[in-house]
Image (tube, rainbow, N blue to C red):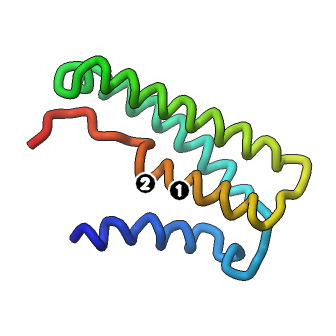
Amino acid sequence: MFKLAAAVPMLLFFAWHPGLLHGDAKIPKRSYVLLIAVILLDVAYFATSWNWGLQYQGAHYTHVVCAVNIAWAAILVLAFARTWKKPPSFVYSLFLHWMLFAWLAWYAFPFLGELP
């Protein structure tokens, strides 16, 4: 089951921008939309889960996870903004998409509730 859970983000990464497999450096508009949507959903998630995080995970953990999410989102926004006017290189596009999907898979929506 763990292997399947680890494979899903990787498969979504390749399905999201199949042009990366062919060396296409262009960043599709849907990537910008995905970034904005995930940031908005992340803010809503933290707003609704904040009290659970404080109660079950502790204030330190909840604050650190929130700070890391803010930093990661800010870095992604700046990196995507850099590509808005100037076309990126293939390596930059690949790394940018990798960072976006790594954030989605790993840190964007941490579990803040009660552990089983």
In the rendered image, which quarter is residue 15 located in?
bottom right
Estimate the x, y position of residue 34 in percent, counting from the top left. Answer: 60, 50
Residue type at mark 2: give it. Ala
User: Tag 2's secondary structure?
Assistant: helix
In the rendered image, which quarter is residue 8 located in?
bottom left
Q: Residues within 10 Å of mark 2 (few under 14, many from 20)?
A: some
For this rendering, which residue is in front, 52 or 76? Answer: 76
Distance from disc 2 to disc 1, alpha carbons, whole Å, reads 6 Å
Residue type at mark 1: give it. Phe
Estimate the x, y position of residue 32 in percent, counting from the top left. Answer: 69, 49
**What residue is drawn where x is 73% and y is 46%?**
80
Estimate the x, y position of residue 104 in percent, counting from the top left. Answer: 47, 50
Residue at which label 1 appears: 101
Please tell me whether residue 55 is drawn above or below residue 96 in the rendered image.
Answer: above
**What residue is drawn where x is 73% and y is 56%?**
29
Q: Is residue 34 left or right of residue 6?
A: right
Residue at which label 2 appears: 105
**What residue is drawn where x is 34% and y is 40%?**
110
Residues at discs 2 and 1 in contact (Cβ within 8 Å): yes
Please tell me whether residue 58 is drawn above or below residue 2 in the rendered image.
Answer: above
Quick one: which residue is furthest to the bottom in this view?
A: 22
